[in-house]
Amino acid sequence: MPKRRRDLQGLGLAMLNRIAGSPALEKLHLQKPAEQALFQASRTGFKVASLAGRPLQTVRKLLEPARLEQQRHEGLFDLSLSDEQTMLVESLRRFADERLRNSSADAESHSEVSEETWNAAMELGLCQMAVPEALGGAGSERSPVTSALITEALAWGDMGQALALLAPVSVAHALADWGNAEQQLHYLSAFAQESPPDAALALLEPTALYDPERPGCRGRAQDGGWLVSGEKSLVPLGPFAQILILSADLEGLGPRLILLEGDANGLHCRKEPAMGLRAASLGRLKLKEVTISAGAIIGDENTLAQAVALARLGWCALAIGCAQAVLDYVGPYANERQAFGEPISHRQGVAFTIADMAIEIEAMRLLLWRAAARAEQGMEYRREALLAYRFCADKAMQIGSNGVQMLGGHDFVKEHPVERWYRDLRATGLFEGGLLL
Amino acid sequence: MIYLEEPKKFRVLIHQARQVATEVFRPNSRKYDRAEHAYPRELDMLSALMDGMNQGGSRDAGAAGLSRASAGDGKIVNGANLSTVLGLIELCWGDVGLALSLPRQGLGNAAIAAVATEKQKRALAHCWAAMAITEPGCGSDSAAIRTTARKDGEDYVINGEKIFVTAGERCDHVVVWASLDPQLGRAAIKSFVVSKDNPGIRVARLEHKLGIRASDTATLVLENCRVPASALLGNPEIDTRKGFGGVMQTFDNTRPVVAAMAIGVARAALERCRELLADAGLDVGYDMQRWRVPAAIARYHELEAEWEAARLLTLRAAWMADNGQPNSLQASMCKAKAGRVGTQVTLHCAELCGSLGYSEDELLEKWARDAKILDIFEGTQQIQLLIIARRLLGKSSAELK
């Protein structure tokens, strides 16, 4: 485990230290519950952390889960961003430009986001925005569109690092959307802390023709709970994730999302390096009779399908950011690069390829925005999500390939970043989960 | 706030257009495909109805309503550009050839709306104006126009030949592109509104075509055609620095309109194809699993995604015009995408439906023929790509040829 990451115990102890002398606790008669929680939480620090961080709200909210508000539109076709969205995109784009773009080669070779970049990203409050205010976060409205904008902006800088950074944010979204009060109390409020936990949504499995709604990961019923066995593939932050939400087919219930802590008995993870997205620290999870109780189940029988759809939209957003990076890179290159006595951009074969990239990227974005906006409005969005995903998968691969083609041999030998984007973009269309909007 | 659904305020208009498409266009679709050059009388009745529609739901829908909004108070506008595009998608779902023959909805009307002065607009309020640009010696390179407009006293005298004029026979006015001075290139090209009553203009021939046979495509000859100075649209001065801007500005508004036509035809094909697939035992669903669906369904999804992409690009270009945002690039993008998607979708739907896709018993073969023109007129695919590439790469037409 990398040293920058505090483990659960550490987090809990840090919180304990902070609340131990708090006069507020005693005054609010929360000393006892807090101590009890501490006592019971022999292994997990989160129970402490959440109780300690926001004693008043959490106790109050214990009976019903906290959800983010749904957005309401005015019924007009509208492509304009809100002022908040514009500001957010601008600041994230700057972060992507200054931090992610510059560190992408390093992050790839170390298969990890550096501590410095990680902390800088978390200071932006990405996780806090996903946590409802009632649980100590800064989130008020649930907006998959805003998530799409955030994801695209980060992926423009580096798709692999963006995936790593957004993995915990996505788990926070899942808990905010579907978690029950107890799950939120124990886990979600931790994402509002200064240093959110490493967490990931693991849906993909190592099999061809994988259908994310029929996971091969299975839970055998036993003693009112389940013994879960199976494998999950290419899990971002897998090797050190502290919280995992994964899909499993539970005997008697069918396919569900379940929550596991990273050090659960029977859960093993190894590094699983892949063609691209190496900065996301991809890992292969192996579950061998991991015991879960009904309390580990997230949401209901419809939740997995929603998670798959929102995850696919997340992949669209990643692909759009990265594809835009390709376009922004090859355009100036084609103007500078001389052949036959003039810039290669003076040739239709080159210029039309670039024009097509631009058209398809715009279309990818609009398809994503439509689906995300429908999700945001609580409208049916399966069709739109499927079409967006399908379209983005095709075009992302094509744009990655054409990007390298525009640079020719110079990029094949890693002089330019486009060869990495080629590898990263290929993930679109084959990935499931990992992040969600 | 991002929201990309059809606005509620246009529901009535869309519904009306759909009624026209279903009750008038579809029943006559094959009839006028076979009887090329026959005048679709049913449309006269319709145009009266359209006038009523324009006074109802959305006053300025249709070609004449297309104009650029001025950037206002920051409020989002869903206006004439968007409603026209949405209405036209419905009409062209019915029949694109008949939609092109709708009285007073010509591309010339759109040109007048885009560049005419208020006075000209009033004078031409109820005209049906065709658009005459192409010549035997020039197609996409409109700058090579040979038709001349010579100043003679207070009048202009126009001479030349125009081909491929949509509704050239049925219209009552023609917007003619002509050069004030062929030596001066693009900047000297101006557009003139010529009345068909003018003795100097005549229809020389009607074309036989691959598709949109319900729409007449005429060759017009102008011989010493004398028009008053007020017939010139826009600025009469030759400003060599501004170049082509004046006449080309029209295209920013009309390209989304032609893109909408492609979207309408393609949707007709997708919907019929879906019904025929269902008859054959395959229901198009939107299940998450991608790899175990039948190949026909996978292909259908692919076509539907391409169609949706074209549609959203087109609505965006129209929305930008409604909101006073410059949209030349987006107008070309939607035209390029919708043009190729229209052909791709209709041809593939024909394939998916087998003999039914090819036989005249169904309209699928007709839609595949109709769609092709939409990737050609109002700027071909290749011209759109040139425009887009030049803008993205900052190239002149001399550099990127």
Image (cartoon, coloured by chain):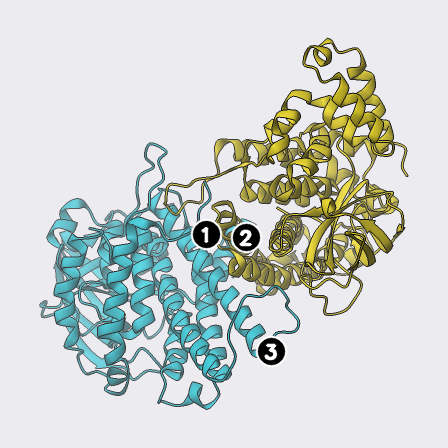
Q: In the image, what residue type sits under mark 2?
A: Leu
Q: CA distance from mark 1 to mark 2?
A: 21 Å
Asked whether B43 or A141 is in front, the reply is A141
Q: Position of residue A102 (x, y in %)?
A: 76, 38
Q: Position of residue A153 (x, y in %)?
A: 63, 41
Say if labels 1 and 2 share a chain. no
Tell me the colour chain A is drawn in.
Answer: yellow
Tag in front: 1 or 2? 2
Q: In the image, what residue type sits under mark 3?
A: Ala
> What kind of element bears circle 2?
helix
| Looking at the image, residue A218 lies above or below residue A174 | below
Tell me the colour chain B is drawn in.
Answer: cyan
| Looking at the image, residue A100 lies above or below residue B220 | above
Q: Is residue B266 left or right of residue B236?
A: right
Q: Chain of mark 3?
A: B
Number of labels in the image equals 3
Pointer 3: residues within 10 angstroms few (<14), some, or many (20+)?
few
Name the residue tied to disc 3.
Answer: B295
Asked whether B43 or B331 is in front, the reply is B43
Q: In the image, what residue type sits under mark 1?
A: Leu
Name the residue tied to disc 2.
Answer: A368
Tell me if I can see residue B161 in this picture: no
Badge 3 or badge 1: first in the primary sequence: 3
What residue lies at 51% left-to-right and 70% top-to-bottom?
B303
What residue lies at 74% left-to-right and 29% top-to-bottom?
A120
Name the residue tied to disc 1.
Answer: B329
